[in-house]
């Protein structure tokens, strides 16, 4: 094992070693970070909320969020390029949904976490 240092009382060498080994083996941290950056935009988060249980066209989303069709289209493009949403064409209309259940799960767990934390905060006040 390598020489580890810390100003605390103990270093758990095996835990550090095993975690470092796993960190080096996983090459997708940039992708994970990028995923959270993409969904971290408030407008895109609102779009994800709208699409979490609904298939919607650009006009539906624009009217739901009170934004222009152009600005929604731009955000949809970013989400689609990053594999967060998908689309299907029906005649002249394009309908959008979340890409898969993983996106939905991540989004819903984040909402649950925030609501839980806000509830804890309100209980303390």
Image (tube, helix red, strand yellow):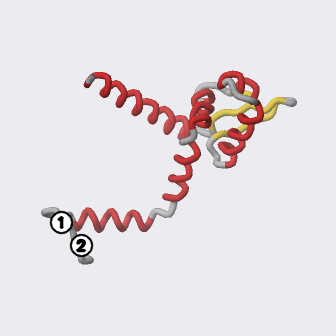
> In this rendering, is residue 15 above or below 104?
below
**Helix, strand or loop at mark 1:** loop
Residue nearer the viewer, 94 or 8 = 8
Q: Mark 2 highlights which residue?
A: 4
- Residue reaching furthest left? 9
- Residue reaching furthest right? 92
Please report the residue visible at 26 percent of the width from the left and 77 percent of the height from the top: 2
> In this rendering, is residue 98 above or below 118?
below
**Helix, strand or loop at mark 2:** loop
**Quadrant into which the C terminus falls:** top left
C-alpha distance separating marks 2 and 1: 11 Å
- Residue reaching furthest front? 125
Q: Image quadrant of residue 96?
A: top right
> x and y percent of residue 3 in the render?
24, 77
Please report the residue visible at 49 percent of the width from the left and 58 percent of the height from the top: 29
In the shown orientation, is residue 79 left or right of residue 10? Answer: right
Please report the residue visible at 69 percent of the width from the left and 48 percent of the height from the top: 81
> In this rendering, is residue 78 above or below 94?
below
Residue 7 - label: 1
Q: Residues within 10 Å of mark 1 (few under 14, many from 20)?
A: few
> x and y percent of residue 99 in the render?
63, 40
> x and y percent of residue 60 in the render?
72, 24
Q: Image quadrant of residue 79?
A: top right
**Quadrant into which the N terminus falls:** bottom left
Q: Residues within 10 Å of mark 2 (few under 14, many from 20)?
A: few
Q: Are marks 2 and 1 in contact (CB under 8 Å)?
A: no
């Amino acid at each position: 094992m390598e020489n580890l240092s810390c100003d605390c009382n103990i270093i758990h060498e095996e835990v550090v070693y095993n975690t470092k080994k796993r960190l080096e083996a996983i090459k997708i941290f940039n992708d994970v970070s990028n995923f959270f950056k993409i969904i971290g935009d408030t407008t895109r988060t609102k779009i994800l909320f709208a699409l979490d249980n609904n298939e919607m066209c650009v006009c539906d989303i624009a009217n739901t969020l009170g934004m222009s069709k152009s600005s929604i289209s731009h955000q949809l493009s970013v989400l689609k390029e990053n594999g967060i949403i998908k689309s299907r064409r029906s005649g002249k209309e394009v309908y959008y949904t979340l890409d898969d259940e993983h996106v939905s799960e991540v989004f819903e767990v984040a909402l649950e976490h925030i609501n839980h934390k806000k509830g804890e905060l309100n209980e303390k006040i």
